[in-house]
Image: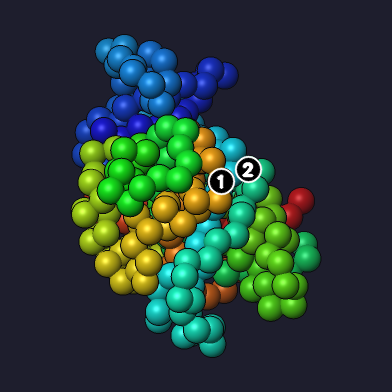
Amino acid sequence: MRIARFSIDGNVAFGAVEGDPSEPDTLAIDIIKGIPFAEFELSGTKVPLSKVRLLPPVLPSKVVAFGRNYAEHAAELGNEVPDAPFAFFKPSTSVIGTGDPVPYPAFSAELHHEAELAVVIGRMCREVPRDRVAEVILGYTCANDLTARDVQRTEKQWARAKGFDASCPLGPWVETDMDLETAAALAITCTVNGELRQAGRTSQMTHAIADLIVNISEAMTLLPGDVILTGTPAGVGPLNVGDEVAVSIEGIGTLTNKVIKRG
Ligand code: MG
């Protein structure tokens, strides 16, 4: 099931997206009664996707992002692949949805895209054993770990470089019919104005999805709706005002955002 969060006529709801994403006219949302983190029912009330505004598919209490988890990407920035996973935070205020604009951060002159597979946590958990990781996952979506690369080079902590407003586009929806094995073998791409910039496969991750969730849940409780970013393949590069950046992941969908001048 593809679970979206959306607004229509000022009301916000979750819904199941039905239809063929390659034919947008066929897409409709069946409104969910309740929330997707518990037992829920489809209402049977369907709205054409074109009539709604898609919102970030979840409102995470935290986004935990793992760095340098693809060897070729670590190398392109002159970094070693870490022996153990290492994580940083992106704040809840960095999250936006597909179609939302990204104001170019005022304190940077080097905004970069990073296409990533995002894992959405489905239930409260901590100290998750490796063989039970699948139980805590609601599904998967696309993410763009937008980065002020110049600031990342000069500041030891990445709170500003990777935590600025709109630095975490998520969407378009959460695909819940996907097991860990499938999620570990997906094509992931990033285009800018239609030009291919990143093309990788989630099988190239150094530390597997399950290991990332074991690692972070050793330290902290994960809540329903929390999001884990799993690292980016090689090919990161600059974005300019006016650019349209799109992250596509096989079996999930496409997350598209435009960079605008900060007002
Ligand atoms: Mg990243």
- From the Cβ of disc 2, is ligand 1 less than 8 Å away? no
Q: Secondary structure at mark 2?
A: helix
Quadrant of the rendered image containing residue 122: top left
| Colour option used | rainbow
Q: Is residue 252 visible?
A: no
Quadrant of the rendered image containing residue 155: bottom right
Is 92 positioned to the left or the right of 214 in the image? Answer: right
Q: Residues within 10 Å of mark 2 (few under 14, many from 20)?
A: some
Indicate whether 221 appears above or below 187.
above
CA–CA distance in space, label 2 to label 1: 16 Å
What residue would you read off at disc 2? 92
Name which residue lies at 50% across and 51% down.
218
Callout 2 touching callout 1 (CB < 8 Å): no
Quadrant of the rendered image containing residue 32: top left
**Residue 220 — which label?**
1
Q: Residues within 10 Å of mark 1 (few under 14, many from 20)?
A: few
Q: Inspect the image, locate mark 2, and give the three-letter code of the amino acid beneath it.
A: Ser
Residue 115 place in picture, x, y as percent: 44, 62
Is 81 positioned to the left or the right of 239 in the image? Answer: left
Is 145 positioned to the left or the right of 92 in the image? Answer: left
| Between 63 and 197, the one nearer to me in the picture | 63
Q: Inspect the image, locate mark 1, and give the three-letter code of the amino acid beneath it.
A: Met
Residue 76 place in picture, x, y as percent: 48, 85
Name which residue lies at 47% across and 66% down.
85
| Between 219 and 140, the one nearer to me in the picture | 219
Figure label count: 2
Name which residue lies at 48% across and 76% down.
82
| Between 231 and 56, the one nearer to me in the picture | 231
Name which residue lies at 65% across and 48% down.
91
Q: Secondary structure at mark 1?
A: loop
Q: Name the quadrant of the N terminus.
A: top left
